[in-house]
Image (cartoon, rainbow, N blue to C red):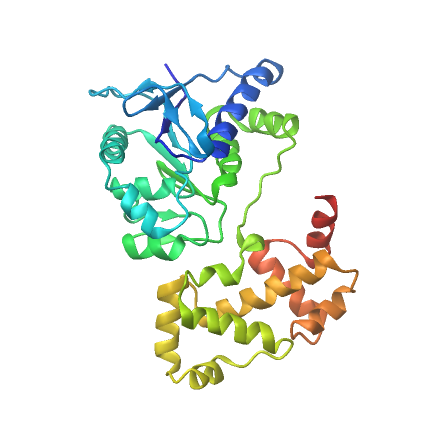
Amino acid sequence: MHDFTVLLLPGAYASSVALTLDMLRAAVSVAPQVDVPVPRWRVLAVGGNPVRLGGGMSLEAKALPRTLRADGSIWVVPGLGLETPRQARERLLQEDAQQAMRALARHASQGGTVAASCSGVFLLQAAGLLRARRVTTSWWLAPSLSQLEPGCTVDANRMVCADGPVITAGAAFAQCDLMLYLLRKRFGPALAQAVSRVLLLDGREAQAPFVVPELLAHGDELVARIVERVRSSLPTPPPVGALAREFGMSERSLARHVRARTGQSTMALVQSVRLNHARMLLESSRMPVEQVAEQVGYGDATALWRLMQRMTGMAPRQLRAASAIA
């Protein structure tokens, strides 16, 4: 019996796949030290060997069986190597992706657990597994996932979301956060902590510290103009009402447009710009936190502290310290 089934599609992020397998191998090494069973896994792919991953790398895999028996393993889909919603839609129309969807749906219908990170979450959505679930994915893909599956709640701020038998994670390197969670779920916290120490990994709870507001635009001219308008006006960004009037729209119309393109409210988009600029100042200068707060439009550091705690889970000095360590 396997504990994990790693399901690969050609073109998957090589780093996401490597993280998965390296963490499992590390778990094998440390499992005896924490007195838990040694993890067992298999690597499957539609059509079997060889699976050509992103960057030209290849990996051996067994062929996905045509007839799937119920098994107790957690099926894991690493990031698919897709960077835009359009790429995701086109990739999921291909026959190998369709076969993978059917296999995932079958596993879930038999009571199995499924997990995916980054654009791999779109494979779960296409398999019909996200309805009425709380999920996450790469923050820049979250609005598209919300549009594809309006019945689910996409929490783009979370690094890992677990909702019953469906477990999802953020961008490609969130695969390490996902695997730590799955090791903890399957074998308990001792093994996950041991793997984390051996590989010098630190579980992260939020994607917010990594959001780049400019990338939220996804080529949308209006959102890009709003981001630039707010950024250039710091430390005194215009109120939402003034932004709407400036762009010849009602506040409601502006809010609908921004949410459709970014998955955020207009105010949240403004806050993302302020937070991103504050992060840049904290990471690239020795400017006191109080001065950083002034530069992004806060009268005192307490307001910036509250914003960062709410959106990133880290205080300004913690963010600066983490940047210095990195």
- Residue 52 at x, y = what percent? 39, 27
- Residue 120 at x, y = what percent? 37, 39
- 133 left or right of 161? left
Residue with the most extreme front position:
56
- Residue 93 at x, y = what percent? 23, 41
Note whether 194 is above or below 122 in the view shown: above
| Between 277 and 164, the one nearer to me in the picture | 277
Q: Residue at x 55, y 46 (%)?
A: 205
Note whether 311 is above or below 204 in the view shown: below
* Residue 205 seen by the camera: yes
- Residue 311 at x, y = what percent? 56, 58
Image label count: 0
Note whether 223 is above or below 211 in the view shown: below
Note whether 167 is above or below 236 in the view shown: above
- 209 left or right of 58? right
- 195 left or right of 222? right
Q: Residue at x 41, y 72 (%)?
A: 222
* Residue 35 seen by the camera: no
Q: Quadrant of the C terminus?
A: top right
Q: Residue at x 49, y 53 (%)?
A: 157
Q: Residue at x 49, y 49 (%)?
A: 158
Q: Quadrant of the N terminus?
A: top left
| Between 81 and 265, the one nearer to me in the picture | 81
